[in-house]
Image (cartoon, rainbow, N blue to C red):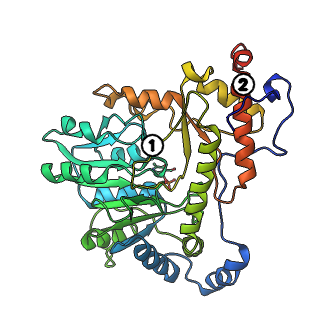
Amino acid sequence: MSLIWHDKPVILGGSPILEEPVSIAKPTLPEMKKIQDEFRQIYHSGMVTNSNYVQRFEERAADYLGVKEAVCVSSCTSGLMLVLKALELTGEVIIPSFTFFASGHALLWNNLKPVFVDCLPSTYNLNHNIINEYITPNTSAIMAVHIFGNPVEIESIQRIADDNNLKVIIDSAHAIGTRYRGRLVGSFGDAEVFCLSPTKVLTAVEGGIVTTNNQELARRLRIGRDYGNPGNYDCEFPGLSARMEEFNALIGLKGLEDIEEIVAKRIRLVNIYQKNICQIPGVLFQQIDAGNTSSYKDLGIIINKDEFGLDRDKLAYALDIEGIATKKYFYPPLHQQRLYSRYQQYPLTATEYVSNNILCLPLYSHMEEKIVQDICHAIWRIYSYREEIAGISIQ
Ligand SMILES: Cc1ncc(COP(=O)(O)O)c(C=O)c1O
């Protein structure tokens, strides 16, 4: 699709390409007929939380991810909070500013100081090349994030951590089904934490899974999700009420059966986007390094205004009028939010560039390929009429 479109975009009075509005994400839930019998059985069993299905889900997830332990929790945020607490971390933790605020919140809840490190403008991930410069005697850990499912440069990060006696916690919220150098993420660092909320590649409606090869850490997490109570009503540490319900575990378990197919589908959809719009000047895709694959929890493109002729906000506005939802994500980055601005110590130039120009396009696992083609068509025609659109002010 390397042509110039002559049909006008809706913002200039043209007709919509899509019959119905497109959302940015939609949950892919297992078919009702696949879960209804077991759902009923759980309902009537009287064991509705943290029981057989949670255990089965944990075993299946650990098996799939190739890791010794998987611990189900109520959310990724509670999982991150518990990992930091269970590891008894103190002082400073290195973290990207280009992430979702839950990564940062887990530090603040544990009285840990975030030290923001810039991202790479190509992969949007923590810039592993500069981490060394930010380590101080107070640093206790590195928290990396697989942004949109694109794996961070784990081996380099682990090497730096080992050289400096630091823990590595990976916020893998986006990354179930992601492969780093051919190996599924889930068994790297001291712990990884996945998110199972509705917009994720695998959903349990809500929930999280912590994975680790450290069995003592897993034991503390199992206690930690239950207030810190080891079973004798004498709490080992102040934990959370962060168990997973059986209903959620059932949905997660069924979804897990299809995870490889789901990720393959998302990669196919992104390839269609890429094939159709990568020739548009100023449209840049997230770089996935050779040997890696992304789960593509999100498809975030960067709009270079000078080349595209419109900035990210104008494109988002024009797409919205076409009935195509987009998301400026993560915008603003953590260090530009009121909770976190006081922690910025160093320039975060790439983070600001990515955050100011990123636009996430619609992507969900059961999306029809035709919808992706139509969205690409809409982007092409907006680009074709960029000069006229540039003169329109955004309300
Ligand atoms: C990078 C990242 N970390 C953590 C979370 C928090 O996940 P949850 O809503 O399960 O707490 C999210 C949620 O989208 C996220 O994107």
Q: Position of residue 9 (x, y in %)?
A: 79, 28
* Dot 1 beta carbon under 8 Å from ligand 1: no
Quadrant of the image occupied by residue 262:
bottom right
For the point 44% across and 54% down, which residue is it? Answer: 77
Secondary structure at numbered mark 1: loop
Q: Position of residue 19 (x, y in %)?
A: 85, 45
Residue, disc 1:
287
Residue, disc 2:
384
For the point 32% across and 31% down, which residue is it? Answer: 343
Relative to 239, 36 lies left or right: right
Task: Say if 126 sits above or below 313 in the image.
Answer: below
Q: Position of residue 222 (x, y in %)?
A: 36, 71
Q: Nearer the viewer, residue 209 or 367?
A: 367
- Amino acid at pointer 2: Ser
Task: Say if 219 sits above or below 276 in the image.
Answer: below
Q: Which quarter of the rendering shows the N terminus?
A: top right
Quadrant of the image occupied by residue 345:
top left
Q: Which quarter of the rendering shows the C terminus?
A: top right
- Amino acid at pointer 1: Gln
For the point 55% across and 48% down, which residue is it? Answer: 298
Asked if the residues shown at circle 2 and circle 1 are in contact, with their CB atoms under 8 angstroms apart, the answer is: no
